[in-house]
Image (cartoon, rainbow, N blue to C red):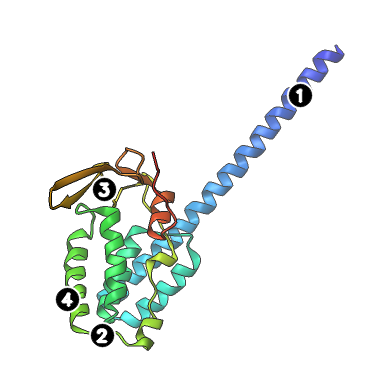
Amino acid sequence: MALMTVMVLTTIFGFSQTTEQEKLRQLEMQRQADRQRIIDRQVDSIASLIEVEQYDEAEKMIVIVLQSVRSVPSSLTFYIGKNSYYLAKYKQSVDWLNKYIQLKGTAGQFSEEAILLKTKAENELVKERLDEGRQATLVFSKDFDLDCGPTGKVTCPVCNGTTVIIKRGYFGDTYKTCGFCQHTGVLSCEDYNKLLKGQLKPSTQ
C-alpha cells in the first residue's frame, strides 16, 4: 500500500512538473509572438514614413528598432537601405541592400527594387567623396545580427551555393571545395552572421 502511494505521488509530482514546464514554454512563446507583433508594426510604420518621404522620421524609428532587436528582420534591412538612399547615405544604403539581396536573392518581395536602388547608390558613390563627419553617422549591418528567416539558413555567399570556389588563372581554372559551408552550399544563420563579421574561419579539411 505504501509503495502504491509513493508511485501515485511520484506520478502526480512528475505530471505537475511537466504541466509547469509546458506553461512556462507557452508563456515564452506568447512573449515572443507579442514582441514580433510590435516589431512588425514598427517596420510597417517605417515603411509608411518612407512612402510619404518622411526620411528623417523613418531613420529615428529605425534607430529605435535596432536598439530593441537581437536580429534584424530581412524586411527591415531593405527599408534601412532604401531610407539611407534617400538620405544620401549611399555607402550605408549599399551595405544594407546587399544584405537583403543576399538573404532573399532575386525572389524576395523587395528584391527588384533593392537591386535597382543598390545600383543607383553605387553610382552615387562613384560621384561623391564622403566626408569624415558623414561617415561617422553611418550605421552598418556588420554591427548587428541578421535574421535569416524561418529556415534559419542562407545560401553560402562565398561559393554561391555551388560548394566549389573557382579561381580563374592564366593556365586555366582551378577548383577548390568551399571551406565555409561544409559541402552543403548553405550556412546556418549563426555562421552567416559570423562570416559577415569576419569571425567564421574556413575548414581545413
Give the label, 2 or 1, closer to the camera.
2
Identify the element where label 4 is drawn.
helix
For mark 2, does the 10 Å Cα neighbourhood hold few (<14), some (14 to 19), or many (20 or more) residues?
few
**Residue picked out by circle 1:** 10
**Foreground of the two, 203 or 94:** 203
**Decide: marks 2, 1 in contact (CB < 8 A)?**
no
Identify the element where label 3 is drawn.
loop
Work out which residue is located at the far top of the displayed protein and give it: 1
Give the Cα distance between marks 2 and 4. 12 Å
What amino acid is at disc 4? Answer: Asn
Residue at 43% from the left image edge and 55% from the top image edge: 194
Residue at 76% from the left image edge and 20% from the top image edge: 8
Mark 4 or 3 closer to N-term? 4
Rendering coords of residue 47 (x, y %): 31, 69
Residue at 40% from the left image edge and 82% from the top image edge: 136
**Foreground of the two, 109 or 91:** 91
Give the Cα distance between marks 4 and 1. 71 Å
Give the Cα distance between marks 4 and 3. 26 Å
Q: Does residue 21 appear left or right of residue 188 in this picture?
A: right
Which label belongs to residue 159? 3
Which label belongs to residue 129? 2
What amino acid is at disc 1? Answer: Thr
What amino acid is at disc 2? Answer: Arg
What amino acid is at disc 3? Answer: Cys
Quadrant containing the C terminus is top left
For mark 4, does the 10 Å Cα neighbourhood hold few (<14), some (14 to 19), or many (20 or more) residues?
few
